[in-house]
Image (cartoon, rainbow, N blue to C red):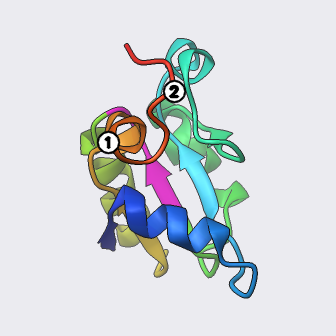
Amino acid sequence: MTQITPQSLRQWLADAGRKPPVLLDVREPWEYQTCRIEGSTLAPMNTIPARARELDPETETVVICHHGMRSLQVALFLERNGFSKLYNLQGGVNAWADQVEPAMPRY
């Protein structure tokens, strides 16, 4: 699992020559409704053990939460379960809002 900064993720998403990653948002539905990175998929942390089979362990996946702690725990869980191309968004959507999308709602 690799840490990725909001700026690095922004550059990756803007790079037309690179396949975009799966953006796996592990926050709760109310958090996701408040703000989210466009293109992300909601999969609350407590659903990951049951839903892990829905994910491709060979696809580059960026795990996202509010500040980067829940996503780190999910990324470590997925890594222990055979996923090899994982990234944790450092600082979560809060850092994304600070560094990339300042108009994003916050909570």
Image location (x, y in percent) of residue 33: 62, 17
Q: Quadrant of residue 45?
A: top left
Q: Which mark is residue 95?
A: 1
* Residue at image location 51% in from the left, 26% down from the top: 103
Image location (x, y in percent) of residue 12: 56, 73
Image quadrant holding the N terminus, namely bottom left
Residue 19 lies, with reference to residue 81, above or below; the image says: below
Residue 81 shows in this picture: no
Q: Nearer the viewer, residue 89 or 102?
A: 102
Q: Which mark is residue 104?
A: 2
Q: Is residue 15 magenta?
A: no
Q: Nearer the viewer, residue 57 or 50?
A: 57
Q: Nearer the viewer, residue 25 or 83?
A: 25
Q: Main secondary structure of the magenta part?
A: strand
Image location (x, y in percent) of residue 38: 68, 42
* Residue at image location 41% in from the left, 36% down from the top: 97
Residues marked 1 and 2 touching at CB (< 8 Å): no
* Residue at image location 52% in from the left, 44% down from the top: 48
Q: Nearer the viewer, residue 64 or 51?
A: 64
Question: Which residues make up the magenta segment?
Answer: 62-66
Q: Which amino acid, mark 2?
A: Met
Q: Quadrant of residue 89?
A: bottom left
